[in-house]
Image (cartoon, rainbow, N blue to C red):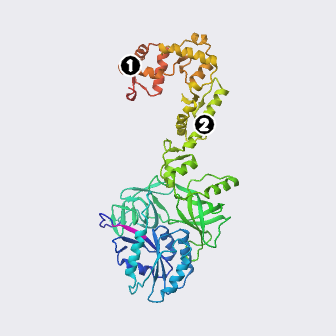
Amino acid sequence: MPEGFGFHSPPPMRVVATAGGAGAGKSTLVRALTGRDPWARLPSGRVLALVDRAAEAVLTSVATAEAVVFVVAADQEWSAQLAVQLDALHALDIRHGLLVVTRADLADPGPVLRRTRRAMATGALGRIESAVVSARTGAGIDRLRLVLDRLAATLPPPPEVPVRLWADGCAEAGAEDKGVLVTGTLLAGSIEREAELAVGAQDRRLRVGGLESLGRQVSAMSAPARITVHLPEAQPDESFTGAALVTPGRWRHVDVVDVRLRPLPGRKLGGVHGHLELGLGSARQPVFLRVLDGDIARLRLSEPLPLRIGDKALLRGCDQAPLRSGAEVLAGCTVLDILPPELATEAQLAARGLELMSRSAIPNGGDELRRRGLVKAGDLLAMGCALPVAPRAGDWLIDPAKLDELCRRLAALVRARAREQPHDPGVPKAEAVALLALPHRRLLEPVARAARDLGVRINQGRLVLTEGGTELPLPVRQAVEKLRAELVSSPFSAPEADRLAALRLTPKSLAAAVRTGLLLRLADGVYLGPDAVERAVAVLCALPQPFTVAAARTALGTSRRVAVPLLELLDTRRITVRLPDSRRRIRPEHD
């Protein structure tokens, strides 16, 4: 990238693309507005970047600009090329623009102006302002600057979303600089020199070596802006045209989306199942469309793209040449869902179409969470949604209604297991995750916490009934309560085998007591109260550190039969550290 001087404070910029047929005088008009600069300075002081491309490349530039200047010549007839471009503007639902009739010195502009107005009347550009000029004589150019200034003032502020720069130009950086230069219109976010951008479904990271805007070097640029990005780590022969450079980790490259169709007048898509071409940003690719219901359809893309709810695209017949003069635009579409569910049956397809009929194309995190029940925060952000206030488990958000449902199901599972297997009543955590069909094991913890009021708790890796809700047989429960009472005064004096036999506590009944949280098992035949670990830590913290097994046994007032497995349990739970000389110390966080 050539050396230059940067803006300390870049002037306010808006980006407008030109459209119109070949020979309409677009380039001459742009030169009349910009002179030798790559931009036009408007009466208010705003800077207007004008993207002027050949007629066959117009549809890419207008799809990535803030507004369009639709140029027609007073001395030319209406053409198929103009009709295709106007269809594309309608399909993309472009709402900001200006109609300019050029070459007014060669013919009466009235008939062309009226004809173009009629053609625009069916779309969102039907009420845009118009101007009549002669670039050769300069007539109307000053008024055109005023009208362009009014247009720039009406453009909405850039959306507050991460960067997505659709590349519409790419060139080798040159002999002195490595890599490539990628050009595009920055419609959202900011890019800084030395920052990273990602490209492609594999999230390939590329460093920004430099930035250029309006012909000058800049250290950073915020939307809206027309910019060139130097990617020194890219290979010189790589082409990024049609790709998007995005903020790393903030977009999802997807290849299946659900959309709302906007068929152009006279071009119905009802019942269509087949291949079309998608135009979105600077990307052009084949897609397979299946209508689900009315104007709702599912698109399967040939290559993943970084999309968001609300994105707008156009569709045309895939068997035609790339979008240029003569290609028929069939419809526009708006993205409703970038992470849709799989649909296996006709009934599911019909139900999905019906559900999407009332779906808004405005991203809403609360609505998405209610629909999905469980969703990753990163996925909501990638959809374009703000994060709602909701229970969380790591990156996962849980809809409160879904949490209530999962709590009830978990409690029912645990109660059923207690009835069916009274001597082995717990549900292992891994099994509970599978039975509840949770997409990640981390989600079980908040569900179990919320289910405490329903009599469920986690004990030693299993979901069990709380003491008040346990269904141990009455004789077993009474025997366990006697044992617990004996342990109150001597918490580390584990009962011997003869005492357990006298209480008629078999290995199965003892296992049930452990799994319901009434006892703690240290080893075969060695049982203490459930609070033994906490009480042991309190005693051992008072010892000089580190300490021996003998010192621990004396302090706890117990035997080696109890002290050794108890200390091993503390090691496993990372409460103590065993040193090379077999002494132990309490970890600082437990001291």
Mark nearer the N terminus (1 vs 2): 2
Q: Does residue 149 appear to the left or right of 333 in the view shown?
A: left
Q: What residue type is labelled 1?
A: Phe
Cα separation between marks 1 and 2? 47 Å
Residue at x 57% of width, y 43% of height: 401
Q: Establish if 229 lies above or below 25.
A: above
Q: Position of residue 526 (x, y in %)?
A: 54, 17
Which residue is pictured at 35% across the width and 78% down the height? 35
Q: In which quarter of the image is the N terminus?
A: bottom left
Q: Main secondary structure of the magenta part?
A: strand
Whether residue 494 is visible to the viewer of this picture, yes or no, is no
Q: Where is residue 147 in the image (x, y as percent from the top left)?
A: 41, 76
- Local SS, label 1: loop
**Near-viewer residue (540 or 561):** 540
Q: Is mark 2 on a helix, strand or loop?
A: helix
Q: Where is residue 531 in the image (x, y as percent from the top left)?
A: 48, 22
Q: Which numbered dot is residue 516?
A: none
At 62% from the left and 61% from the top, the residue drawn is 296
The stretch in magenta equals: 11-15
Residue 408: assigned label: 2
Residue with the mark numbered 1? 547
Please give left or right for residue 162 compared with residue 359 in the image.
left
Kind of residue sitting beneath label 2: Arg
Q: Is residue 416 found inside the magenta-colored segment of the image?
A: no
**Along the line of sight, which residue is nearer the eye, 128 or 276?**
128
Q: How many labels does the image show?
A: 2
Identify whether 483 is placed above or below 570.
Answer: above
